[in-house]
Image (tube, rainbow, N blue to C red):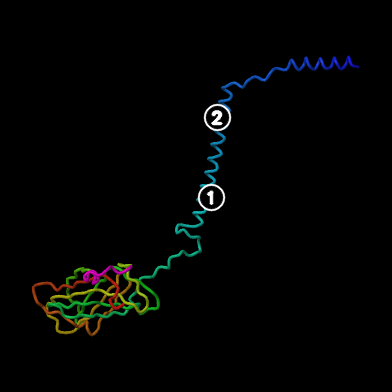
Amino acid sequence: MDDDLNQLEQVLRDRAAEVPHVQDVPPRMLVRARRRVARNALASVLGAVLIVAGASAGLGALHGPGGTLPGTSGSSAPPSTACAASDLQGTVSLEGAMGSVEGSIDLTNVGGATCTLTGRPAVSISDAQGNDVRVQVIASEPQWKANAAPQPRGWPVVSLRPGSAASVRVRWSNACPQLSGPVSWKIDLGNGAGTVDASSADASFVPPCNGPTDPSTLEVGPFEPSAGA
């Protein structure tokens, strides 16, 4: 029995001696392995970047161009609509000044909601018979600038709450041929918003005809907050 065990042990030793030793890995194989690992790592990083970018784009689409989710309101107040002629009541206040009449056209918001005015209106004058008075219209600066006052907040947009007023500076010179009766003033708001009749007791002021061969001039300023608002 012992002899058989010894013989078996010897056979196992001989077989073990025949097994070849593990040789070192060739350098070229190591380089290939490192390249494969680097490529796999790069592919994993690029995949993660694409996933993050896709998620960000999805969130941006949900929020929309205004930065808020559809159906939700932002922090800013809803914009006011432009004033229509039916929202406004006009009055003209004039006084004589060195051969001219000057003053302002005031437009009061008699509507039930806030509205806005901006730009320079088209102002026309009619005589007592309803005929247009020929005037050369000249753009002038607003009253606040002529007074060297600070620019009103929000100008050139004038926001009118119900009951508040905007003003238009006017100066009329050299009414030739000389008018004998009262006149009426109309203010075209522009952009299809309509025309306001701004006639009043003061609107009948007419400047003298100082130069029959010279044109009659009407200086008109832009909308601005009324001094009494």
Residue type, label 2: Arg
Identify residue type, mark 1.
Answer: Ala
Closer to the camera in the image, 92 or 226: 226
Q: Position of residue 189 (x, y in %)?
A: 29, 72
Residue highlighted by disc 2:
35
Q: Which residue is mark 1?
A: 55
Q: Secondary structure at mark 1?
A: helix
Q: Where does the magenta region start and end? A: 142-153
Q: Does the magenta run of residues contain 146?
A: yes
Horizontal side, residue 141 vs residue 155: left or right: left
Q: Nearer the viewer, residue 178 or 165?
A: 165
Which badge, 2 or 1, comes first in the chain's sequence?
2
Q: Quadrant of residue 161?
A: bottom left
Image quadrant where residue 147 sits: bottom left
Q: Mark 1 Cα within 10 Å, few/some/many (few <14, many 20+)?
A: few
Specify the principal SS of the magenta part. Answer: loop
- Asked whether 207 falls inside the magenta stretch, the response is no
Tell me the residue at 18%/81% (across/down).
Answer: 95
Residue at left 88%, top 16%?
4
Q: Label 2, label 1: how many angstroms apart (C-alpha)?
A: 31 Å
Query: Where does residue 222 sit, x and y in percent of width and height?
Result: 26, 70
Helix, strand or loop at disc 2? helix
Mark 2 and mark 1 residues within 8 Å of each other at the beta carbon = no
Q: How many marks?
A: 2
x and y, in percent, of residue 175 in the image: 14, 77
